[in-house]
Image: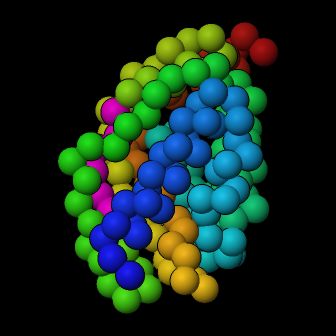
Amino acid sequence: MSLNDIRAASTRFYDALNKMAAGDAVPMAEAWAQTDGAWAQHPIGGRDLGYDTIVAGFAKVAEIAGGGQIRLSDQRIDLGTDLAVETGLETGTIVLGGHEATIHQRVTNVYRRANGTWKLAHHHTDISEDILSILKRLSKAA
């Protein structure tokens, strides 16, 4: 177990996040720990509890996503035996329903090691007023 293992898990998650931004949520299922104890607090607010709910939530976003690029910068990792905490700044863009949102938010990710593999167990970002505004416009248009 090393920092490189956590960096690899982080890379898998951000690769999956960018694929979701392009409309493909399938890789997201592999990035997450398959446990009812997983949870996510997204930039649109609310909280998803459990692997199935989290993966379904990302799939809903992928349905309206049309591109973008999300990057992690200022990465800091605190590594324990079976848990690791990653903090940083997510920046970039995402296109939702044809509207581009700017991403600039703090993030905390918690990774859990199970059966020798590190998977995401928690993802928490700041609220994104830009994304919320787009979702509000899309819901009014529907």
**Nearer to the camera, 41 or 27:** 27
Quadrant of the drawing holding the N terminus = bottom left
Quadrant of the drawing holding the C terminus = top right
**Nearer to the camera, 92 or 96:** 92
Could you say where residue 59 lies in the image, as x and y percent from the top left?
73, 42
Q: Is residue 99 left or right of residue 84?
A: right
Q: Quadrant of residue 71?
A: top left
| Residue at left offset 59%, top offset 31% | 21
**Nearer to the camera, 80 or 123:** 80
Q: Quadrant of residue 139?
A: top right
Could you say where residue 91 lies in the image, as x and y percent from the top left?
34, 33
Q: Which residues are magenta?
A: 85-91
Task: Tell me: residue 96, above or below residue 27.
Answer: above
Q: Is residue 135 left or right of residue 90?
A: right
Residue 129 in view (yes/no): no
| Magenta-drawn stretch contains 88 | yes
Task: Tell me: residue 92, above or below residue 24.
Answer: above
Could you say where residue 56 lies in the image, as x and y percent from the top left?
75, 50
